Amino acid sequence: MTDSKKSATLTIDGASYDLPIHSPTAGPDVLDIRKLYAQAGVFTYDPGFTSTASCDSTITFIDGGKGELLHRGYPIDQLAGKSHYLEVCYLLLYGALPTAAQLEDFENRVTNHTMIHEQMANFFRGFRRDAHPMAIITGVVGAMSAFYHDSTDINDPWQREVASIRMIAKMPTIVAMAYKYTIGQPFVYPRNDLDYASNFLRMCFAVPAEDYEVNPILARAMDRIFTLHADHEQNASTSTVRLASSSGANPFACIAAGVACLWGPAHGGANQACLEMLREIGSVDRIPEFIERAKDKNDPFRLMGFGHRVYKNVDPRATVLKQSADEVLELLGVENNPLLQVAKVLEETALNDPYFKEKKLFPNVDFYSGIILEAMGFPTSMFTPIFALSRTVGWISQWQEMISDPTMKIGRPRQLYQGETLRDYTDIEER
Ligand code: CMC
């Protein structure tokens, strides 16, 4: 962090405190309150971190007002259009676009780690067949620290690198195995002659009894979904990974924590919730009823796939996915899919409604991803696992950045205590 030239003065009970202001390379200035408690004896209060920067980072930048998402400075629409997932993984992890030789080396390293320890298959078999794949994935990722002892020392940069490559390489295998297990089909091993997205599709949809040819257009759409979800700065699951790792926990435990957090419907679970909502709406004529419910303060219903903590403009990932949805559905000959029709009219109706306009609620990435994934043949329960697979590189990059930072401290928020003050224990017969 550079020395700050600006400062703000805070006055409490007549005493003044100078607070440094840091200017980032992009985004709003940041008021540094690290010494505030020591100097003034007060905490700051910000539940949900709506105004709090929790770390320094050089990985991802979002301008929510403009609807801009940059990875290491490169806009997401350019990456989704011109690059591919593994190149974006390299960019997020190492900070620069790779040369051809660096990319080849990186792809080889990832490819060499796609298989999981055979003993891990027994973990899958311990779950009920009707388990949600996210429950299985949370457990299996956590279990990785019991298998890969040679990459759990967070103080060794080489072990951190191996853990990073392992996570990116094995996540498609784990997610596909979770899917196969829940549908009662045999596990399909990875094939290292295929690209990352094609290999994943094959592990999900191939069966030993038949040949499976990966459709390159679907593989491209899959790769684009991975790319669009790769990182999103300090969101809930990434902050969970950072908080878990601040205690020195091993990388597999930290990523398992991220997977668990992502599952919630306000975060990565929104893509499943969104498709279930489109199904519940069912037909275009029922849209007004659901729009009214979303606006009703006494009804907990929200339009899933709408709104974002940071974007107060169109989510740039949704723009790319809307186009991808059209392409994929046309390719599959299901462009008249009733869910897509409902989604399109719902989007238009909400965007023209004063409530959504005033609150700056736009479609987010989850609005269209579910439609594409469903058209590809994935059940809704696989939507969040695919998000987890894609986001693994973001979690890992942010974890690497944090561990390499010499000023890293254990995360320990404070509180605004509203409970009882000191009182004496009452014996049970006197209560
Ligand atoms: N439908 C109807 N009203 C909404 C919606 C929605 N989807 N989202 C926000 N609002 C209203 C909300 O009721 C509140 O109104 P008021 O000011 O009158 O109380 C106002 O807009 C601000 O909402 P908030 O809950 O204070 O905003 P937040 O920043 O805490 O929440 C959010 C952001 C994403 C959790 C929320 O917009 C939401 O629940 N959206 C639906 C779930 C969803 O699509 N999540 C995926 C997010 S993108 C993928 C990811 O990052 O994981």
Image: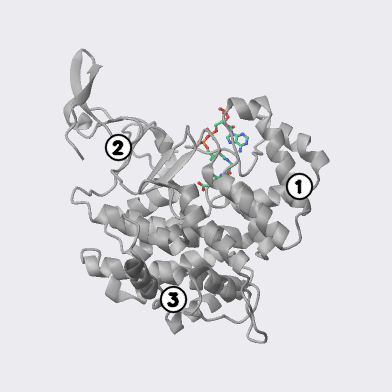
> Is residue 28 positioned above or below 14 on the image?
below
Q: Quadrant of residue 332?
A: bottom right
Point 41% across, 62% down: residue: 87
Q: Secondary structure at mark 1?
A: helix
Rendering quarter of residue 9: top left
Residue hosting label 2: 25
The crowd level at tag 2 (other Cα within 10 Å; few <14, some 14-19, many 20+) is: few
The answer to which image quadrant residue 29 occupies is top left
Q: Position of residue 113 (x, y in %)?
A: 39, 76
Q: Amino acid at mark 2?
A: Thr
Spot occupied by residue 388 in the image (x, y as percentages of width and height): 49, 59
Ligand 1 sits in quadrant: top right
- Up the image or down, 208 lies above or below 129; here it is below
Name the quarter where the N terminus is drawn.
Answer: top left
Q: Point out the tag, 3 or 1, that comes first from the N-terminus.
A: 3
Q: Is residue 246 left or right of residue 377?
A: left
The residue to which callout 3 is attached is 114
SS at circle 3 = loop
Three-letter residue code for mark 1: Gln
Q: Which residue is mark 1?
A: 341
Question: Is the Cβ of the residue at disc 3 closer than 8 Å to that at disc 1?
Answer: no
Q: Which kind of residue does numbered mark 3 sit on?
A: Thr
Horizontal and vertical percent position of residue 11: 23, 16
